[in-house]
Image (cartoon, grey):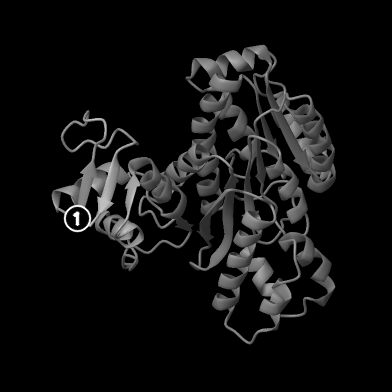
Amino acid sequence: MATPDSTIWPVERHTQAKHEILRRYLGAWLPILLNRYQRARIVDGFAGPGEYEGGQIGSPLIVLQTLLDHPDKGVQTAIRKGTVEIIFIEQDQKRSHHLRELLAQQALKTTQLQPSIITGTFTTEMEQLLLKMERQRARKMPVPTFVFIDPFGYSHTPMHIIARIMQQPMCEVLVNFMAEEINRFLAVDYRTKEQHYDLLFGTDEWRQIARQAITPAERRRLQHELYQRQLLDVAGAKYVWPFRMRNRRNATDYFLFFCTNSIKGLVEMKRAMWKVDPSGNFEFSDFSNPYQPLLLNELNDADLQARLISHFKGQTVTVGEIEHYVHAHTPYLNCKEKGLKPLEQAGKIRVIDPFSRRNRQSFSDDRLRITFL
């Protein structure tokens, strides 16, 4: 979608899918953090006006709604104590003003949840916030932070900012990589945009991709791989997981990349994404065709079992190591019931129980050792 000129605009289905991922993840992430650390910070770096033409709410109100309506007692206690910090950044003055007026109508005065609405660029304001975060870290008082980076373009989300965020303890990022727009400009004259691309990718390696005589699909694949590699190697994220968004033509529009250093955070984000795409292919399309055939790579239990056998063949490893592999490197979540149990029944693995406490066909103890035959 092109950058709209109006203050508010119609919502698209893939935007609603993106917001559902955001809602579900925050719903799972907040109680984990607030019950453990009693503090959290949420930053919406491109907040927008807060609503769409049809009255649908935008990401700022989704954040607030998720907090205020959350059934967890720890979340509600943190709200009452004022230990949840919400920051909405929006560069456009009209949209920022619209958001401010919209939030003024909400029933927030009775709570300690008072979001900061900042009119400014994401880069400038995030740099200021990072200075604060770095001082908090130096005082050994870091605040777990989730940063939602959802721009229309690609010129305001430099890799070095994501890297500084990920260097802080307990920080996570969900960033929109505008693949279609980037790919379109690489196919024509990109020379006036070189600096923007260098900052976006954190390298000039994208130029090698731009110079190749390849199809748009191949160019997009290479861009995707480069960006994901940079999030891991340069930004320093331990885990990175993408989700593809397709437009009404079923063409790739953009990717959401989730970056975290927590395997638990990764599991909860994958769980949120599975709710939006139950096929497990981690994508959503505005294109509706009831006669569209199933994808050839439709995920299933047999595929999970085949991946386990291929990866661990001839090895003896713990259940914990197997579960980490599944969570970090495959689309799946449930490796015990869907993977290990059927493999044991089929005689393809042998279970070694050094503690002699195992219940029949149970894999609840992560210290159990599994030999792949």
The residue depicted at 38 percent of the width and 44 percent of the height is 323
The residue depicted at 55 percent of the width and 21 percent of the height is 36
How many circles with numbers are drawn on the protein? 1
Secondary structure of residue under mark 1: loop
**Residue 299 drawn above or below residue 326:** below
Give, as a three-letter code, the residue at label 1: Lys
Q: Position of residue 8 (x, y in %)?
A: 69, 46
| Left or right: residue 263 compared with residue 347 | right
**Residue 317 drawn above or below residue 107:** below
The residue depicted at 66 percent of the width and 77 percent of the height is 209
| Left or right: residue 155 compared with residue 253 | right
Q: Position of residue 327 (x, y in %)?
A: 43, 47
Q: Position of residue 211 (x, y in %)?
A: 70, 83
**Residue 342 drawn above or below residue 209:** above
The residue depicted at 53 percent of the width and 55 percent of the height is 242
Q: Residues within 10 Å of mark 1 (few under 14, many from 20)?
A: some
| Label 1 sits on residue | 348
| Left or right: residue 338 compared with residue 270 | left
Considering every residue shown, the one lying at the far bottom of the view is 213
| Left or right: residue 98 compared with residue 287 | right
Residue nearest the viewer, comparing 173 with 151: 173
The answer, for residue 157, to whether it is visible in the render is no
Q: Position of residue 274 (x, y in %)?
A: 41, 47
